[in-house]
Amino acid sequence: MTPTSSARRRRTMLKAGAGASVAALLLAACADTDSGDGGGGGGQAAERGSYEIDCSKYDEFGDLDGTTVHVYTTIVEPEGTAHQASYEPFTECTGVQIEYEASREQEAQLPVRVRAGNPPDIAIVNQPGLLETLVRQDDAVLPAPAQVEAEVDENFSAEWKEYGTVDGTFYAAPYDANVKSFVWYSPSAFSDAGYEVPETWDELISLSEQIASAGDVKPWCVGVESGAATGWPGTDWIEDVVLRTAGPDVYDQWYQHEIPFNDPQIVEAWDTAGEILKNEDFVNAGLGGVDSIATTAWDGAGYGILDNTCWMHRAANFYQAQWPEGTEVAEDGDVWAFYLPAETTDERPTLVAGPFIAAFTDRPEVQAFQTYLASADWANAKAVATPEGGWVSANQGLDPENLATDFDRLVYETLTDEATVARYDASDLMPSQVGSGTFFTGIVNWLTGQSTQQVLDQIENTWPTS
């Protein structure tokens, strides 16, 4: 039932039985009295499959029953179901209905809607570069309220807060998080062929050459098609290689444009990536030649690993959710992933990313929902609402036992490991006309015939002058 202002529930619990589908999630209210542990977030997670949140922190926003918050995101089905399920505890607490709108074209359409005076209440913005554009050029995103900032200060490292800050003002809390430096493969296929997981970049190239020389199946399958965002998976490849060949300091200079986009060190990184991506002997397993990468949908590009038409597919942790139903993701299962190696085993550069929560209105129900999404409560509720796995957060209040899979826990350990040298996705930090514009199209042009220097010169010429 929907809670009323006179009898708002003090606690609500999200439950998912072992092996249950998201559709079978059960929301069950606990006692209609305070538990005496105050208004702090975090709740309890006594077992995998349930998470209890505290509703009292939303009392300060007043009577919200019957109000609606419109959320606009790129997170479409099937992943969208779990996100909507994770919002249900907030609705149970407050009576606020969440209107969920998802579109693969959101990144292109959001600025159009903002400029037309028709923004959503909240947008899950994938690129800090787009956030920066919406703040500086459109003056549309509202600074985060104090309650949201307090949640972020408690639950996230300073670096993650900085990514949601523009010109010294904090606007947007982190949503979820990804680790992109993974290569998916079949453990059994590797074992049967006598292949070992490579630990350096040279070993990775040597393995690719060994597979290619066998002549049966090309080593790599790759796809960068993604509707209006076509090209983005290729930018991940480039960013990972820049981290490995030029290093984190040069990487920072590159995305901040302290060195030009076409700096020789960046040219070298693209050419190094091209040793795989533009090598007809290495790609595109079961899908075509090099140019087929541009037209192969990113979300199904790795499926050849399952039918032995492909050996390796570089993709982020969230690709776990893209495997067909019934695929076992485990070290001894159908698929697993290894760290994309650096030049030496002593290095651990890691590409990370994640969206941010931008608000365009400041009604109390919107601010309350922002606060929920920045809390450990939401991170744990979302983990429970994702029984198939493929989702992680950088929220330090997340109990890893609530994560669905061993792979998710591995990703969380990577995110929180002090040895990891993490850098946020550069295309997401660049101005949006480059990061989600000419960088994307440049990848397609490069894969379909243009030279590295041509592409990088063209992208450099589009960098905004102010």
Image (cartoon, rainbow, N blue to C red):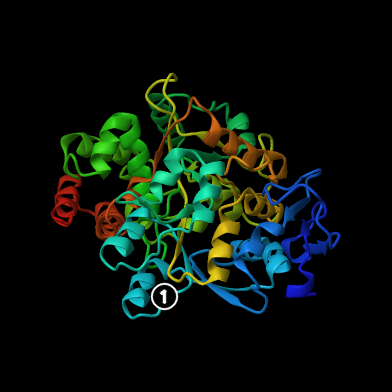
Measured as percent of width and height from the top left, residue 42 is found at 68, 46
Q: Residue at x 69, y 52 (%)?
A: 39
Quarter occupied by the C terminus: bottom left
Image mark count = 1
Q: Residue at x 48, y 65 (%)?
A: 74
Q: Which three-letter amino acid code belongs to the residue tagged 1? A: Pro
Measured as percent of width and height from the top left, residue 15 is found at 79, 56
Instruction: Tell me if I can see residue 443 in this picture.
Output: yes
Measured as percent of width and height from the top left, residue 21 is found at 75, 60
Would you place residue 42 above or below residue 358 in this image? above
Q: Residue at x 64, y 38 (%)?
A: 409
Would you place residue 414 above or below residue 91 in this image? above
Closer-to-camera residue (236/297): 236
Quarter occupied by the N terminus: bottom right
Would you place residue 401 above or below residue 465 in this image? above
Answer left or right for 39 relative to 196. Answer: right
Q: Secondary structure at mark 1?
A: loop
Tag 1 residue: 119
Q: Residue at x 80, y 63 (%)?
A: 26
Would you place residue 419 above or below residue 357 in this image? above
Q: Picture quarter containing residue 350?
A: top left
Q: Picture quarter containing residue 251?
A: top left
Q: Residue furthest right?
A: 31
Closer-to-camera residue (119/345): 119
Q: Residues within 10 Å of mark 1 (few under 14, many from 20)?
A: many
Measured as percent of width and height from the top left, residue 232 is found at 37, 55
Instruction: Tell me if I can see residue 289 in this picture.
Output: no
Answer left or right for 220 relative to 47. Answer: left
Q: Picture quarter containing residue 6?
A: bottom right
